[in-house]
Amino acid sequence: MKNVGLITGASSGIGMELAKIHALKGRDLILVARRVDELMKLKIELETAYNVQVEVLPMDLMKENAADSLFQLVQEKNIQVDYLFNNAGLGGYGKFHERDLKKEREMIQLNIIALTELTHLFLPGMVQRKSGKILNTASTAGFLPGPMQSVYFATKAFVVSFTQGVAQEVCNDGVTLTALCPGPVKTEFEKAAGMEGSSLFKSATTAESTARKGYRAMDKGKLIAISDNSLKFALNWVLPFAPRKLVLKMIQNMQTIK
């Protein structure tokens, strides 16, 4: 296999679209997610359409030590990962004190711990080879606190900060890290997070458009890719100068389910 991209959360949404873009460029793939059937369908589609090699490794990254298990499987198959797409993520709606703590732990495990561990496991090989790219799917939520999704917003803030810090550490080693920061995207996330009916997703963009912008930014070695221009303007030039309590109230109102 050559120019291998390992994509977590590859069975749907942004992860699936990233896989299609990677395959379109003639680059091989490792697809990781929980749903085996969906991964196998995607494998057949990509191998047939683009004449690439696709390895399917079903894995639940919400489980402890899953990242280590995934890395060991890749090592046993003697596959070199040149592109790492830490895309798997989980959200959840509701007041923090009313939500199930187990679900919050799972969110932290997937959004932070698994991403951190996979980066730590695959990055040394990239640094040694003086070549490699990592795309971490964060969110514009990573630039703000998020009442009604407090833990989710906080996990994405970690991803944005972590990506930039590590990117600077390896900037002279031929390796780049990019944080993809979309606004609301029409994927299964809306339903899985229990946010159907929220005004936040009324103007959501597509997973295909988001993946395309993120992939392009990764290829160019950009640090941050905010895929929505209007949100980029608001984050840079409006919200930083607004009273914080007003911003918090506005975010809460946007996420309230009607």
Image (cartoon, rainbow, N blue to C red):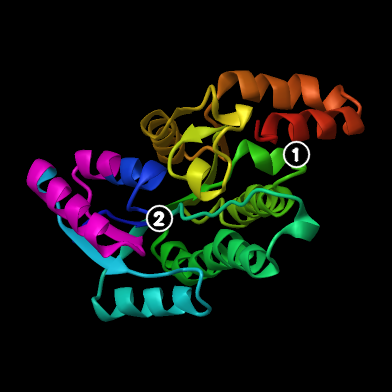
Measured as percent of width and height from the top left, residue 19 is found at: 29, 46
Q: In this view, does 9 lie to the left or right of 176?
A: left
- Assess disc 2: are there few (<14), some (14-19) or many (≥20) residues with their C-alpha within 10 Å of its C-alpha: many
What is the quadrant of residue 228 in the picture?
A: top right
Is 79 rendered above or below residue 1?
below
Q: Which residue is drawn at 46% across and 55% down?
A: 88
Disc 1, disc 2: CB below 8 Å? no
The label on residue 144 is 1
What x and y, as percent, mark residue 70? 38, 74
The residue at the point 48 percent across, 72 percent down is 121
Report the label total.
Answer: 2
Q: In this view, does 232 lie above or below 157?
A: above
Q: Circle 2 sits on which residue? A: 9
Task: Of the two numbered discs 1 and 2 on the same chain, state the one appearing first in sequence.
Answer: 2
Q: State the image quarter where residue 139 is shown.
A: top right
Q: Does dot 1 land on a helix, a strand or a loop?
A: loop
Rounded to the nearest angstrom, the CA distance separating label 1 from label 2 is 24 Å
Q: Residue at x 42, y 69 (%)?
A: 60
Q: Is residue 143 above or below residue 33?
A: above
Q: Decide which of 129, 52 is in the foreground and name it.
A: 52
Q: Quadrant of the N terminus?
A: bottom left
Tag 2: residue type?
Gly
The residues colored magenta run: 20-49
Q: For the stretch drawn in magenta, what is the main secondary structure?
A: helix
In what quadrant of the picture does the C terminus appear? top right
> Label 1 is placed on what type of residue?
Leu
User: Local crowd at mark 1 within 10 Å, few (<14), some, or many (≥20)?
Assistant: many
Residue 146, image x, y percentages: 74, 42
For numbered disc 2, what is the local secondary structure? loop
**Magenta stretch contains residue 55:** no
28 sits left or right of 5 in the view = left
